[in-house]
Amino acid sequence: MGKAGSVNRYRLWYWARVLVQLCSLLLFLFLFIKTDYSGSDTIEYAVNILFRIDPLLAFCTMLAARTFIALMIPALILVVLSLFFGRFFCGWLCPMGGFLDFWRFCWRIKTSRKETRYPRLPRILLLFLLVCALFGLPFVGYFDPFSILVRGLVQAVYPAIRFISDSFFGYTYHNLPAAVNLVTEPVYAFMQATILPFEQRFYELTLVSGLILAAVFFSEFFQSRFFCRNVCPLGALLGLFGRYGTMSLRGGDESCGKCTLCRTGCRMGAVDENRKILSSTCILCMDCMLKCPKQIIHPQLRAPLTTAAGDTMTNSREASISRRQFLVCLSAGAALPPLLAVRNHGGKGQGTLIRPPGALIEQEFLSSCVRCGECIQVCITNGLQPAFFQAGLEGAFTPYLLARSGYCEFNCTLCGQVCPTGAIEPLELDQKHTRKIGHAWFDKNICLPFAKNIPCIVCEEHCPTPDKAIKFNLVEVITGQGERITLKQPYVVDELCIGCGICETKCPLPGRAAIFVTNTGEDRDPENRLPGAETATIDGYS
Amino acid sequence: MNRRQFIQQALAFSAGFSFSLPEVFAAPVTRPDLAIVTGKNYRDVVVQSIELLGGIEQFVHTGDTVVVKPNIGWDRNPEQAANTNPLVVKGLIELALDAGASRVDLFDHTCNEKRRCYQNSGMVDMVKSFGSKKVRLEHIDPRKFIPVQIEKGKSLTSWEIYEQAISADVYINVPVAKHHGLGVLSLGLKNSMGVIGGNRGKLHHDLGQRLADLATVVSPTLTVIDATRILLRNGPQGGSLDDVKQLDQVIASVDPVAADAYGTTLFGLVPEDIASTVAANKMGLGQMDLTKVNMRKKTL
């Protein structure tokens, strides 16, 4: 064994891990920025791959949707790797973990000596999510670390960065002398071309998504890797595989000096009083290998599918769930569906829930959607917004089109391309052109040509279908002054309108638009046909 | 030109059969108000149309900043005739660079998503083909709209206008001729809506007069109407090739009203059908009576 004072023989291993973690963070950021229109109708890379390698999302989604999702096959890679290397993902690759480690580094937060607060919670949560999924309830997206991270970044952090940059460079442009602008303008242009989002975006759940992410980060002040130790159900799942991993760290033993440096310095709290390392908690960060004065902690191999020697009675009790907890999870998961089923939806969002083109029928959509917000990030018009409770408790953070915020761009199919689970099917352009996601309606009480005899038809101008779905009648009206004028009064052609909502976005009326879209008539739901468009058949009896 | 053609032209001119001077005398003597050139090679068509107006040197001088303002309002490709054809724009940029322009800027305040419009209109690739830092296709920068008093305006007295559109030494308006639901047609005056900010839909309440008002402050050095393909129905963004008619024509003029007036006739309409043309003519911004316009047509 190495002598005190000599160079630690594991330091290269340690720094290799740090380097891999850093690269994985940079890759994540690269993919995140690239999740945008790039001049091509097909997206090259997107951060959605992260969601496709997530076995927690894969299990829960397939269980809830009761179907095999080929898009999520990459999750198998992580399962297999975890069977060999335990929870290495959490310490080496997970972007959430990486950010948290970086965050502690920036704030010089010392690794907390506190015992893990709720060591059983992640497993309880995991079980609860699986049970819910079994009953068709899609709650996994609320707790999945990637969903929390990407949602928070997309809906809060990234737009806020744009806002700060715009405010700063707006100030320099308008108020500072040309000499300063000679420097600031190229910097601004460079930032716009590289890291800034293309345009300022606005999101309905900025505060909610932002606060959830902030809570994860600020809990680091309470305990290192608080989220990973006390909440993360993905970590719990990987830990289950890790228990049987072929590689784990061998902790201290009777012969070691009982200094407990490994225990106090462990960011995951994975070392017990006897300096044994819990393989279901250890993320192979190798802090302990570096700190152990005798350098006796080292990686060990063992036969596959046997629990590690370190998992003593105490240890496994610490992280396992009791029978009572198991039953509570089961019954809670079982009790929820009937309760949720008997809620009065009041018409489910009053028809405002316009889902992206290609979205599955609502029930299937809800069970497949993992709330990652990828579609919301990639939507080039800022039209897709995260729902709060419009779609019920089980529909929070799911995407819907808020047409006053942005419309569904006629030639764009990006949302279906980035959806990691196929909750939004990818559409070909010609399918997209005719996919009806909703329907436009005039409010003649406020529409200018009807209500005020003022010419307008901006809606007709913007209507994108080659044969316009908004047409107009030439009508002779008598104004309040008794003047006889001819006026163009618009109307919607049911068969042509696809519900893209550009009419509502562009309606020049301040405040409420005089034309608005609802999900009525959407193709995905035969129950939601427009009056007159229903076929006189009953399901299955055509 | 050989000797025989010269004598024929000179005789025809002196006999009053032709309004056009023999080419050797033409340039310094008269310049038409309106040049209408037809041909398959759009670049040559554009170059020729400016040549007929007296050559680009009449308008662009060494060191000038030039704005070329095409219609790039829609996420449509050139064949769909909702945006100005990039080849027409390319011809103008080449001319401006040849005349010594220090920089040529292109932009439009788009209706569809900006990047998609620039990309799919073919403008991005066209500008890239120059490979020159002098030619710039930039997205509208919201900081650069300035409030402008429209002193002569009857219906529109102030509005936010993109600074470059006003400050450039030379402003070349390059609309595509197309159908428009409210304005009947979208031509040169309507294309100016691409350099203004604010809630543009509001202008629709008295569109004809307001476009004329706008033309008092956004006054192009040259108007070049792209009628290589015109959109007959479902404008201003179309989408169906059935609504497109190929004319292979470009109309150039220093008179924005005359250019629009002539453009109107391509649709089987008369200048009086377009409210903005009538209003602008009334305000003295140009001639809409085509019998009083000195025009020269040429087919390549």
Image (cartoon, grey):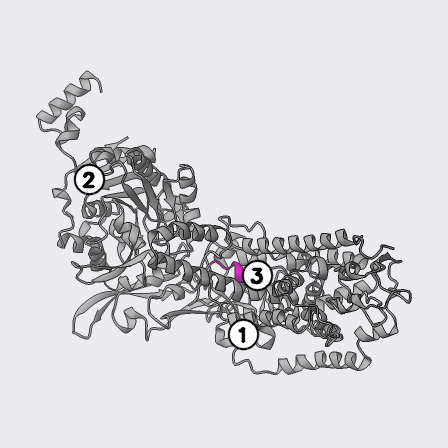
Q: Position of residue B293 (x, y in %)?
A: 14, 42
The residue at the far top in this view is B3
Chain letter of the residue beneath label 1 in the structure image: A
Q: Which residue is mark 2?
A: B34
For the residues beneath circles 2 and 3, the answer to whether they share a chain is: no
Kind of residue at badge 2 = Leu
Please give the name of the residue rendered at 15% of the width and 48% of the height, measured from the top-left corner.
B286
Image quarter for residue B196?
bottom left
Circle 3 sits in a helix, a strand or a loop, which is it? Answer: helix
Circles 1 and 3 on the same subunit: yes
Is A279 located above or below residue B144 in the figure?
below
Farthest-out residue, left: B15
Contact between marks 1 and 2 (CB within 8 A): the answer is no
CA gap, disc 1 and disc 3? 16 Å
Residue type, mark 1 in image: Phe
Counting from the top left corner in percent of width and height, residue A410 is at 45, 56
- Per the model, the C-alpha gap separating discs 2 and 3 is 53 Å
SS at mark 1? loop
Disc 3 is attached to a residue of which chain?
A
Residue A371 x, y percent position in the rendering: 60, 67
The image shows residue B220 at horizontal and vertical percentages of 23, 47
Q: Is residue A172 above or below residue B219?
A: below
Residue extending farthest to the front is A5
Residues drawn in magenta: A375-380
The residue labelled by disc 3 is A374
Question: In the rendered image, which residue does mark 1 sit on?
Answer: A388
Magenta-drawn stretch, dominant element (helix, strand or loop): helix
Closer to the observer: label 2 or label 3?
A: 3
B242, A328: nearer the viewer? A328
Left or right of B13? Residue A502 is right
Q: Residues within 10 Å of mark 1 (few under 14, many from 20)?
A: some
